[in-house]
């Protein structure tokens, strides 16, 4: 249930790509009619198997990718048609942290210098204020001891934390974390997650957390949306999605984390359909153990089945 006002609202978002294999043209529906909102101060996770469209949606919200159709409101302002490069406020307010820390900076530069440069680029803070801001941030992220180390000697975990620091130093309102734990050791993953939660408790910040790491998303999220083939099949609070999932796909997904979802393992048959052969029906019907006739021909709507828990499934229509 949402209590605080929405920071960002997404309406009917779609992203299609035209695939042209030797003139046999087809349309890839990577994001296929998605609507949701994220309240101020919450952590909203997008989960689902690889290729379901999570990053594409994240990049659209981060204004790094233009959608085919749809509308985005940020603090009530329609930003759908705004160009990120031309809007300084938007560049600062919405930060996108990519899955791999890829520094475009001089590898011999120190972390402190790099963060100074980020502030300078965004015309933020005089020197003294900037230095305070950076020191404070590095302290709260447990990075103060390596503030003057060159970037080239950092471990993968430190590089990812510095990548996140580059976003946080701008004091954004929304941080999109696209698979921030990818490629990190388990112990480093929990360190990054702890730091993200710690920062969130201290600042009025909202996270959009994109991941196929179900344990991590359980740990950090308030709200969760489950994606399947470019659509949201279920959305609710973290306990609703992980402990009381309703959609057959969510149930199968959660059965892979027996430490949280205490039911029998569900093994799905087949593979997800290609995004280039959309059907009018439910994208999950070929693999669904409960598929009915209606599932083949009619796309189910996302409906509220329990308070705050939305499901797109004909079983509950
Ligand atoms: N520029 C593009 N042109 C064509 N297809 C694309 C393009 N970008 C992404 N796709 C396809 O869109 C689908 C969704 O990709 P996306 O990266 O959004 O998925 P994801 O859920 O984030 O997966 P992962 O966790 O593996 O990154 C994939 O099948 C991908 O190949």
Image (cartoon, grey):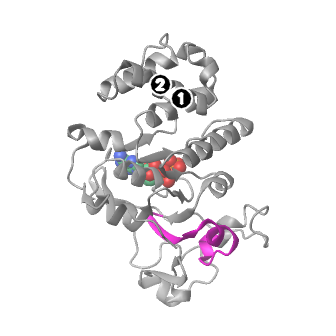
Q: Quadrant of residue 28?
A: bottom left
Q: Are marks 1 and 2 in contact (CB under 8 Å)?
A: yes
**Does residue 213 appear in this view?**
yes
User: Per the image, is 201 magenta?
Assistant: no
* 111 over 312 or under it: above or below: above
Q: Nearer the viewer, residue 62 or 3?
A: 3
At x 65%, y 65%, the residue is 253
* Magenta span of residues: 229-250
Judge the density around disc 2: few (<14), some (14-19), many (≥20) Cα neighbours within 10 Å: few
* 4 over 50 or under it: above or below: below
Image location of residue 134, percent across then percent down: 48, 26
* 298 over 214 or under it: above or below: below
Image location of residue 243, percent across then percent down: 70, 71
User: Per the image, is 237 magenta?
Assistant: yes
At x 78%, y 73%, the residue is 263
Q: Nearer the viewer, residue 117 or 288?
A: 117
Q: Which mark is residue 136?
A: 1
């Amino acid at each position: 249930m949402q209590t605080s006002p929405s920071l960002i609202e997404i309406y009917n978002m779609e992203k299609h790509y035209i695939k042209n294999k030797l003139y046999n043209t087809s349309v890839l529906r990577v994001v296929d009619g998605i609507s949701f909102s994220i309240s101020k101060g919450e952590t909203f996770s997008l989960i689902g198997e690889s290729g379901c469209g999570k990053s594409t949606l994240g990049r659209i919200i981060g204004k790094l990718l233009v959608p085919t159709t749809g509308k985005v409101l940020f603090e009530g302002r329609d930003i759908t048609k705004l160009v990120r490069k031309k809007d300084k406020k938007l560049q600062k307010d919405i930060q996108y942290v990519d899955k791999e820390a890829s520094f475009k900076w001089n590898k011999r530069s120190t972390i402190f210098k790099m963060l100074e440069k980020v502030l300078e680029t965004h015309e933020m803070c005089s020197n003294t204020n900037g230095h305070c801001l950076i020191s404070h941030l590095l302290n709260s992220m447990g990075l103060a001891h390596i503030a003057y180390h060159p970037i080239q000697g950092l471990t993968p975990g430190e590089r990812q934390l510095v990548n996140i620091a580059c976003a946080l130093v701008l004091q954004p309102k929304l941080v999109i974390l696209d698979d921030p734990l990818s490629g990190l050791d388990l112990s480093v993953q929990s360190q990054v997650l702890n730091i993200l939660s710690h920062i969130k408790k201290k600042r009025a910040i909202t996270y959009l957390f994109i991941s196929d790491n179900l344990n991590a998303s359980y740990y950090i999220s308030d709200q969760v949306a489950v994606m399947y083939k470019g659509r949201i099949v279920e959305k609710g609070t973290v306990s609703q999605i992980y402990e009381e999932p309703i959609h057959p796909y969510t149930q199968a997904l959660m059965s892979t984390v027996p430490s949280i979802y205490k039911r029998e393992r569900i093994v799905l048959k087949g593979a997800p359909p290609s995004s280039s052969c959309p059907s009018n029906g439910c994208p999950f019907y070929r693999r669904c153990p409960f598929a009915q006739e209606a599932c083949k021909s009619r796309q189910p709507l996302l409906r509220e089945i329990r308070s705050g828990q939305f499901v797109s499934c004909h079983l509950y229509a």
